[in-house]
Image: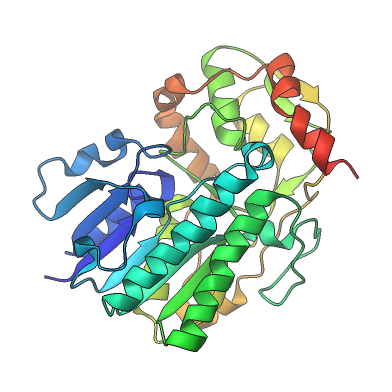
Amino acid sequence: MKKALVTGGAGFIGSHMVDLLIKKKFKVVVLDNFVAGNRKNLLQHKNNKNLKIINKDIKNIKKNDRNFKNTKYIFHFAGLGDIVPSIEKPKEYIMNNAIGTLNILEAARYNNVKKLVYAASASCYGINNKKIDETAEINLEHPYALSKYMGEELLLHWVRVFGLNANSIRIFNAYGTRSKTSGQYGAVFGVFFKQKLQNQPLTIVGNGKQKRDFVYVTDVAKAFYQAAISKKNGQIFNIASNKPIEVNFLAGLISNKKVHVPKRPGEPFCSWGNINKAKRDLAWSPKVKFKDGVNKMLKNLSYWNAAPLWTKKRIKLATKTWFKYLKK
């Protein structure tokens, strides 16, 4: 049986990757330290003998780690997300997202893994308010973007110098079921859903006319699989919907109660990914329509009961360092 290893496999995108691999009859090993991941994201495979879950931190992975032995594909999602904590703890982000990735690359090289696919971030493009392809200028606005880009640069270097087979996926705005419920102020869906559950107004940043290129999580997982089985190597792919959605439109699908909070510096007005390369080279395109994706999440609304409630006052306090260091 083919074996795949998923770092961060108990997390948001990682757990959906596990679903896809199990469906495709892979034996799957999940490495997760459960800082951001949650075991309940994998409960649907509780009695599946083809899934092995290991509590492990990527910062501590050795190249001869036995879990990597006889692995065909590695899907590397593990790392730290969110902008604000990256400003507060930049070294921690570099250690996890860059050095942790280096450890995974070395384990893949040592164990002759057929292909590794890395979860990079479209945050590397910075404030770029037009449709952008993979050749766009890099503009690293915060330590989170820097740390993810460092991981990508390491991967490309390992491809060039050491002959590693690997591709990098620059994810735009992934959304869907199992998106995190942790205590950090971040992704808009978790913020909005908790506010809806508590019958509180949705906190709209600025005028709400900013647009995000939301792509549903199962489509993201399929893109990673296509990047693994593809003959393409050492390539970067944008993964997005190619149809930016206004935040006001998203809010309208969830609630009619709204309040506004100040616009944040260092954020683009519009994120918009050109996905022609992924369509051409990976035979991939997004399938889930935005409204359908939101409805799937609303049907699982209780998942966000564990999320913190963000009020205007709490958001102001949580984003204090954001305004301090990213103010233009």
Q: Which quadrant of the structure image shows residue 260? A: top right
Res 215 visible = no
Determine whether, in the image, residue 40 is placed left or right of residue 302: left
Dividing the image into 4 quarters, which one contains the N terminus?
bottom left
Res 61 visible = yes
Instruction: Write the residue at 21% across / 47% down.
Output: 53
Q: Which quadrant of the structure image shows residue 242? A: bottom right
216 to 132, vertically: above or below: above
Dividing the image into 4 quarters, which one contains the C terminus?
top right
Instruction: Write the residue at 33% across / 67% down.
Output: 74
Instruction: Write the residue at 43% across / 55% down.
Output: 77
Q: Which quadrant of the structure image shows residue 109? A: bottom left
Q: Nearer the viewer, residue 303 or 39?
A: 39
On the image, the x and y values in percent for residue 157 come to 54, 80
Q: Looking at this rendering, what residue extends furthest in the top direction? A: 199
On the image, the x and y values in percent for residue 213 come to 65, 54
On the image, the x and y values in percent for residue 306 come to 43, 21
